[in-house]
Amino acid sequence: MTKRINNFSAGPAILPVEVLEEARDNMLSLGDTGIGIMEHSHRGKAFIAVLEQVEADCRKLANISDDYSILFLQGGASSQFFMVPMNFLEPTQTADYLLTGSWAQKAAEQATRYGKVHTAASSKDRNFAYIPKTATYSEKPAYVHFTSNNTIFGTQWAKEPETPKGSTLICDASSDIFCRPLDVSKYGMIYAGAQKNLGPSGVTLVILRKDLMGRGKTDLPEMLQYRIHADNESCYNTPPTFGIYFMGLVFKWILKQGGLEAVGAANTAKANVLYQYLDKSSMFRATADADSRSLMNVTFVTGKEDVDNKFISEAKKAGFDGLKGHRSVGGMRASIYNAFPKSGCEELVAFMGDFEKKNG
Amino acid sequence: MTKRINNFSAGPAILPVEVLEEARDNMLSLGDTGIGIMEHSHRGKAFIAVLEQVEADCRKLANISDDYSILFLQGGASSQFFMVPMNFLEPTQTADYLLTGSWAQKAAEQATRYGKVHTAASSKDRNFAYIPKTATYSEKPAYVHFTSNNTIFGTQWAKEPETPKGSTLICDASSDIFCRPLDVSKYGMIYAGAQKNLGPSGVTLVILRKDLMGRGKTDLPEMLQYRIHADNESCYNTPPTFGIYFMGLVFKWILKQGGLEAVGAANTAKANVLYQYLDKSSMFRATADADSRSLMNVTFVTGKEDVDNKFISEAKKAGFDGLKGHRSVGGMRASIYNAFPKSGCEELVAFMGDFEKKNG
């Protein structure tokens, strides 16, 4: 097999090798069924067993109670951006959004179609380089929406924003779900496109409190109503069976690591390798404020565009792929999701040290 | 490897072995990139090259001109059921639907949310056992929608319905796309969930004439506007990269068979093996009218529920899986999509002959 390289892609992103191997080995026959995982009917016993196990493992992983439905939808977080307000925001109501990056803004823009949108906090003044410490909420928000990790800007909420008592918290956790312990009971809804921490693109995990789901509008196309998907156990239409299966393998892999506590500790150690180097480097510096740094996306610059470009180019030749930062920040971004190994962070730091010596 | 069995599932369904093998072999590294197919960024060179090749092969396969956009969306045909009228039907307009089965009805039901729906023809009077020979259209339909193959009822349009000059034909071809030659220029739009003839569930192929796309509404969420997906080459949001890649392998596999002519001849030969047996059997009979029979889904009954059940159960033990018919028809259904081999049809007929002798 071709040697695997260090893949720092922001998403679709690196997946655990042993999970890839298991999916690969079930491609022509799921276990001894004689039918590949993608070829099983979503109504058949084999896939229904897969689906039930995936849900059970998801509940186990984050200790999710029966007050919540777990849905496997399509259309990515981008579909949730409009489905959330379409379902839960009336024209006379206000939804509060915490603007910590481009994706948070995109989510808020969709809500303006359905009701009023209040910006409770924003870090746009410094190009989203930090997580706001305070927020000013509207009087009775239909919900409060935030983006737990900002892929582009390398920032992450250290914990959930403090919101007025009784408010409904909705989170786009696409780029950091299950990267550390998570108290689901604080949320009305958590959604995440799979392609960063959960599996291949094309499946979206939605964890939705049932009482919130019940308040959703009923005059929408069935495919856009959460309750329809819940009532049909994500099989109202043919679900993305392979993506769901793969997500289940990832859940099992996290459980095998020791669950979210263990994965959180590993992610902190990985990120520290990079941030500690960046903090002492005289060439590179992290772009996010120290108290707002992401465990998942480490953004950094040299301050000189030509040096950034030289670094990215040489790193790529040396087997470090996907390090080019998003154009809104420039510089570099090392995405180190759950599946990214600590050894890859150490190798990158060693490479950066060499580069710094040669070009300093 | 576990021996593969005869998989007659209606969808998700059997996929070509050599395509499954190629996907499997690229799971941990796409070619020599050192990054698995699911782990490549959708913005990276490797995936963009895949995407461009998939579109080029799709155009080649069905001789699709530049007047059409080719989109890779999510949400299955079920999302197209509402997106089509949401985009193309004004409240004052009428859309004509040809009702040849449950899925055609579901498509029509969604349209009632957006405008007037006229049933131009229906075969409901005989439980959808035939394709109507005539249709009565409304005066100026916004479009005419039909379902080219009816998975549940085992019927298929032999050719496109005749429609008034200048009308826009829209087709749900989920269960028979690319099963035989197709003149795309007759259509305003063709859409198909992948999970029967194209690949794994979770990606929807949409072939859409650009002038029709241009008439779509502009005040919808971006994710629900076709033009947004076209303008962004199916990458407005993260597309289902693996499903698109897999679909491309299927296109190449069809081209290698000799294209749609060759595949059409093979499918006719396969279906004939079953229909010829059914026509001479004194125990089994096909449920669809002879002139309306599907090349893809062969539905049949014994006329006695207990015998049907015994047959299904014994067939399953003998390695013929997925033969239970949909509850709306009962009996049996052999789904024999493009990837299903003729040898499987011959084996089934031999098994049916034995069963008939023992139980006749």
Image: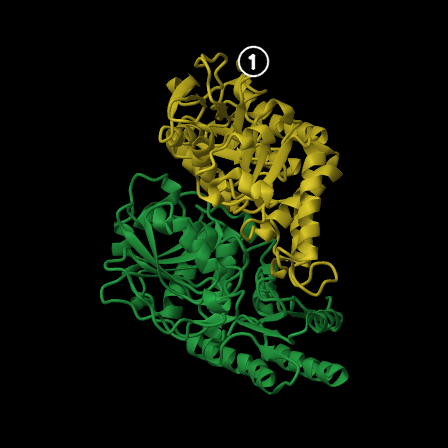
Chain colours: A yellow, B green
Q: Position of residue B287 (x, y in %)?
A: 55, 74
For residue B87, above or below residue B17:
above
Q: Position of residue B181 (x, y in %)?
A: 40, 74
Q: Is residue A50 visible?
A: yes
**Residue for badge 1:** A165
Residue pictured at 77% horizontal, 83% vertical = B358
Q: Nearer the viewer, residue A14 or B290?
A: B290
Label 1 CA crowd tier, 10 Å (few <14, some 14–19, many 20+): few
Q: Nearer the viewer, residue B136 or B272?
A: B136
Residue pictured at 48% horizontal, 37% vertical = A77
Q: Is residue A271 left or right of residue B83?
A: right
For residue A282, above or below residue A151:
above
Q: Nearer the viewer, residue A144 or A212?
A: A212
Residue at far front of view: B125
Residue type beneath disc 1: Lys
Q: Position of residue A161 (x, y in %)?
A: 54, 18
Q: Secondary structure at mark 1?
A: loop
Residue pictured at 67% horizontal, 80% vertical = B347
Q: How many marks?
A: 1
Q: Position of residue A119 (x, y in %)?
A: 40, 19
Q: Is residue B233 visible?
A: no
Residue pictured at 55% horizontal, 45% vertical = A203
